[in-house]
DNA sequence: AACGAAACCTGCGCGC
DNA sequence: TGCGCGCAGGTTTCGT
């Protein structure tokens, strides 16, 4: 499911519902969601911890507790629900009982999501966080240029690699590359300093707009907590195969770039 | 260093 | 109706 706008939406919704509540019990129904080495530690240490804040970086959610930080990555299908009664179905894998008599439930059809509990004091050192680059809002385009100017990888997969810049996923990267008129298979070392400026600026614009609309809801995916995004109405190319390009009216093409479905206007986004 | 492919999982829509 | 296939908003790992 989620890229940066959806993750922010989930975190903000959860903040409104469970901030300052204390965890009274934890049930784990599918161990692989939790970092293997963490399981016993995870179950025992979470009890009596209060959720003081919920932060995000890129696609990572961080529940800031008293002594720990609970990292949660939703990967493709992870969702949170807040229930009034203890509810479990076949895809509910972790349930936190809270002291306001509500239940925070992690639901994940494909079981790709991950959680990890880490000491609050050193949480910035957690590998989950250390390998995430700045979000576009903080990213210095000159730094991005210096990081990528000699790379011979294609720009789309490189932007999907969260270690350079975080938050873009398969939907928004297509939108950003369309907006900047860059073909997704362009090699990083063919792009100019100005291209990287445009990429950062377009990322900020696209993500901000999506955040303001509560993210994107397409296909079977419905955001957690009944939140349904509205950015799908703003998409220019992603999902628009065979439809007219909003700029030049040529047909938008769907192809594969390093294994990911990719939507391009071949007229607006020329190979170099 | 960088690529593809596979892995982790389940469900959906499609063509036959 | 049933089956097989391809596909899915992510990331890691493994082999070449």
Image: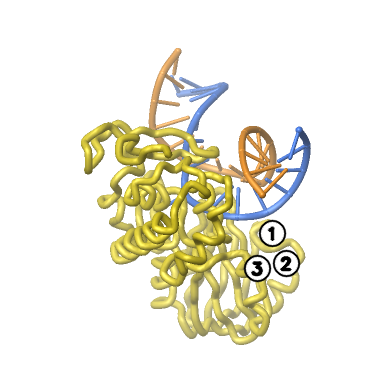
Chain colours: A yellow, B orange, C blue
The label nearer to you, 1 versus 3, is 3
Q: Residue A108 location, x and y as percent? A: 54, 54
Q: Residue at x 59, y 80 (%)?
A: A24
Q: Check the image and report above or below for A118 versus A229.
A: below
Q: Nearer the viewer, residue A182 or A99?
A: A182
Tag 2 near tag 1, CB within 8 Å: yes
Q: Residues within 10 Å of mark 1 (few under 14, many from 20)?
A: some
Query: For the residue labelled by badge 2, is the local secondary structure a helix, a strand or a loop?
Result: helix
Q: Is residue A29 left or right of residue A14?
A: right
Query: For the residue labelled by badge 1, is the local secondary structure a helix, a strand or a loop?
Result: helix
The chain containing the residue under callout 2 comes to A
Q: Nearer the viewer, residue A226 or A236?
A: A236
Q: Residue at x 61, y 77 (%)?
A: A69
Q: Check the image and report above or below for A257 versus A199.
A: above
Disc 3 target residue:
A116
The answer to whether residue A155 of the structure is visible from this angle is yes
Q: Residues within 10 Å of mark 3 (few under 14, many from 20)?
A: many
The image's mark for residue A147 is none
- Which of the image's four quarters has the C terminus of chain A? top left
Label 2 – label 3 distance at C-alpha: 9 Å
Q: Residue A233 location, x and y as percent? A: 26, 50
Disc 2 target residue:
A39
Q: Residues within 10 Å of mark 2 (few under 14, many from 20)?
A: some
Query: For the residue labelled by badge 3, is the local secondary structure a helix, a strand or a loop?
Result: strand
The chain containing the residue under callout 1 comes to A
Label 1 – label 3 distance at C-alpha: 11 Å
Disc 1 target residue:
A31
The chain containing the residue under callout 3 comes to A
Q: Residue at x 43, y 77 (%)?
A: A15
Q: Nearer the viewer, residue A196 or A29?
A: A196
Q: Which callout, 2 or 1, points at the residue further toward the start of the chain? A: 1
Q: Residue A247 location, x and y as percent? A: 22, 43
């Amino acid at each position: 499911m989620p890229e940066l706008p959806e993750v922010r939406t989930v975190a903000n919704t959860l903040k409104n519902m469970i901030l300052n509540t204390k965890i009274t019990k934890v049930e784990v129904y599918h161990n692989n969601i939790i970092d293997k080495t963490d399981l016993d530690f995870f179950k025992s240490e979470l009890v009596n911890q209060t959720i003081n804040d919920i932060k995000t970086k890129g696609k990572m959610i961080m529940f800031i507790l008293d002594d720990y930080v609970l990292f949660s990555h939703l990967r493709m299908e992870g969702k949170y629900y807040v229930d009034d009664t203890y509810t479990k179905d076949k895809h509910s894998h972790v349930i936190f009982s809270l002291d306001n008599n509500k239940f925070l439930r992690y639901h994940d059809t494909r079981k790709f999501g991950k959680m990890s509990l880490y000491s609050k004091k050193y949480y910035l050192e957690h590998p989950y966080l250390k390998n995430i680059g700045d979000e576009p809002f903080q990213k210095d385009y000159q730094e991005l240029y210096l990081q990528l100017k000699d790379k011979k990888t294609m720009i789309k997969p490189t932007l999907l690699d969260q270690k350079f810049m975080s938050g873009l996923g398969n939907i928004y990267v297509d939108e950003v590359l369309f907006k900047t008129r860059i073909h997704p298979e362009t090699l990083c070392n063919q792009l100019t300093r100005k291209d990287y400026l445009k990429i950062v600026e377009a990322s900020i614009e696209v993500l901000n707009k999506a955040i303001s609309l509560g993210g994107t809801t397409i296909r079977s995916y419905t955001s957690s907590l009944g939140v349904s995004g509205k950015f799908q109405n703003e998409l220019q190319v992603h999902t628009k195969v065979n439809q007219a390009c909003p700029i030049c009216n040529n047909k938008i093409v769907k192809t594969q770039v390093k294994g990911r479905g990719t939507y391009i206007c071949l007229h607006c986004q020329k190979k170099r």
